[in-house]
Amino acid sequence: MNTNNSLLGFALLGLLHQHPMSGYDLRKIFASSAMGSFSDSPGAIYPALARLEVQGLIRGKVENSASLRKRRLFKLAPKGVTAFRAWVKRPVRRDDVIRRLGELMLRFAFTDQSLGDRQAALFLKQFEAELAGYIPSLKQYLDTNVSKMPLSGRLALECGIQEYEARLKWARTSLAFYDRRKRNKL
């Protein structure tokens, strides 16, 4: 997939991986779900769909209907399935944890359906390891620099550390769910 594709493009691929949808259907999801951080504007959705179609990642087909307004349904092309799964499967890196938490959570949200429990658990293990390795460096920075920091800076850094600690706790709890599910399937 073109590295210039936006996170919106991957979000669209993920939703279309679930089942074919129209641009309007996709806009409704963005407007009414936790995916609201993406624009539900036609000026964002339809050009993104057009780019994905030009790249051969999706295919649009006008649906026959009795309605005066025809719906165009989009579905993933084989190339789109491959590109989407490769994106979801990418290893979790420290830089992702620092700069791309939203993208990581989007990837994780699509992992079960696109790659299964085993890959979801692997994602969580990688996420846990990167967080567990990063948090001590933040704490060390705070300890070393606390006397030089303004109060607001110190409090902001402490907030960030607590957010990372909460994500680490979440990763461990989530991993336990997958472990239990795996044991129950045996």
Image (cartoon, rainbow, N blue to C red):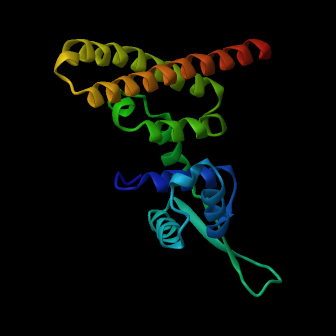
- Residue 186 at least partly seen: no
In the displayed image of the protein, which residue is found farthest to the left?
A: 148
- Residue 58 % position (x, y): 55, 61
| Quadrant location, the C terminus | top right
What x and y, as percent, mark residue 152? 29, 31
From this viewpoint, which residue is outermost toward the right? 66
Task: Locate residue 84 relative to residue 164 in the image: left or right.
Answer: right
Say whether residue 43 is left or right of residue 117: left
Q: Quadrant of residue 119?
A: top right
In front here: 139 or 112? 139
Is 166 located above or below residue 95 in the figure?
above
Q: At 19% from the left edge and 16% from the top edge, which residue is drawn?
A: 147
Q: Observer-nearest residue: 33 or 110?
A: 33
Q: Where residue 170 appears, x then y in whole percent?
A: 57, 22
Q: Residue at x 51, y 22 (%)?
A: 166
Quick check: 2 left or right of 74? left
- Image: 86 above or below 117: below
Q: Is residue 69 above or below residue 101?
A: below
Residue 93 seen by the camera: yes
Q: Is residue 31 left or right of residue 141?
A: right
- Determine the residue positioned at 77% across, 78% down: 64
